[in-house]
Image: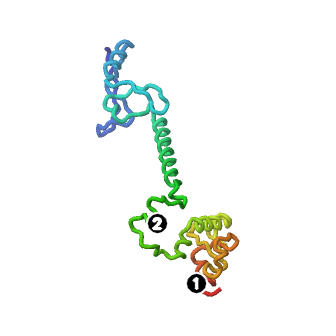
């Protein structure tokens, strides 16, 4: 090996200036460089989890390195996130979330059954049909208050004809109106007031 002396650039206080090279720069022939590079390799070759290309990994990185590059690692992570989201959506869209109850634990078979004490009005308000009606009214009105035009606020679905006085119009979409909370409080039949 032949060592080539290089001068190091320092400032007045003797500190190294950023970007300066080290004092000794090794000039080696190709055979020596190959020996040095082969001698340093203590790891193994692995296959990338995303693109399946072989890559070298140091011994200290073997336990956590899965991909050949950062871009492959990010793509693999995105695939995992998308897979987990699909699993979560399938859980949320299962038969229990669609309004169907399991007959094994519904009604009298449930451990906390109290002889049907839930009022009929509460059952109707919490039914799937009411949720679908509310969603249809919001979609028809483009999720905006029909009086003040606000969006991105908590919206109420208002019955134009009262819920209690007109039970046949409860789930009629033409009887619904999308309102923000403040505008809903100002309607004449809010909270059981007279029509």
Given residues 109 and 155, the one toward you in this image is 109
Q: Is residue 9 above or below residue 137?
A: above
The image position of residue 101, as x and y in percent, is 50, 60
Please tell me how crowded label 1 is: few (under 14), some (14-19), or many (20+) other residues with Cα within 10 Å.
few
Residue under label 1: 192
Residue that extends furthest to the bottom in the rendered view of this protein: 194
| Spot occupied by residue 192 in the image (x, y as percentages of width and height) | 58, 84
Disc ID at residue 107 = 2
Report the front residue among 98 and 18: 98
Q: Name the mark on residue 43.
A: none
Q: Is residue 45 above or below residue 80?
A: above
Q: Residue furthest right?
A: 174
Q: CA distance from mark 1 to mark 2?
A: 31 Å
How packed mark 2 is, by other alpha carbons closer than 10 Å (few <14, some 14-19, many 20 or more), is some
Decide if residue 71 is on the left or right side of residue 20: right
- Front of the two marks 1 and 2: 2
């Amino acid at each position: 090996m032949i060592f080539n002396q290089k001068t190091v650039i320092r400032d007045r206080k003797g500190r190294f200036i950023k970007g300066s090279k080290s004092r000794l720069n090794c000039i080696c022939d190709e055979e020596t460089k190959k020996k040095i590079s082969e001698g340093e390799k203590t790891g193994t070759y692995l296959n990338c989890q995303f693109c399946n290309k072989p890559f070298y990994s140091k011994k200290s990185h073997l336990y956590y390195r899965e991909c050949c590059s950062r871009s492959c690692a990010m793509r693999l992570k995105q695939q995992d996130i998308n897979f987990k989201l699909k699993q979560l959506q399938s859980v949320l869209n299962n038969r229990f979330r669609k309004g169907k109850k399991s007959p094994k634990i519904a009604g009298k078979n449930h451990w906390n059954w109290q002889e049907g004490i839930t009022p009929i009005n509460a059952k109707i308000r919490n039914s799937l049909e009411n949720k679908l009606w509310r969603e249809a009214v919001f979609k028809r009105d483009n999720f905006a208050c029909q009086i003040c035009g606000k969006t991105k606020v908590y919206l109420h679905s208002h019955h134009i004809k009262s819920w209690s006085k007109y039970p046949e119009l409860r789930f009629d979409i033409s009887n619904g109106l999308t309102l923000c909370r403040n505008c809903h409080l100002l309607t004449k039949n809010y909270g059981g007031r007279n029509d």
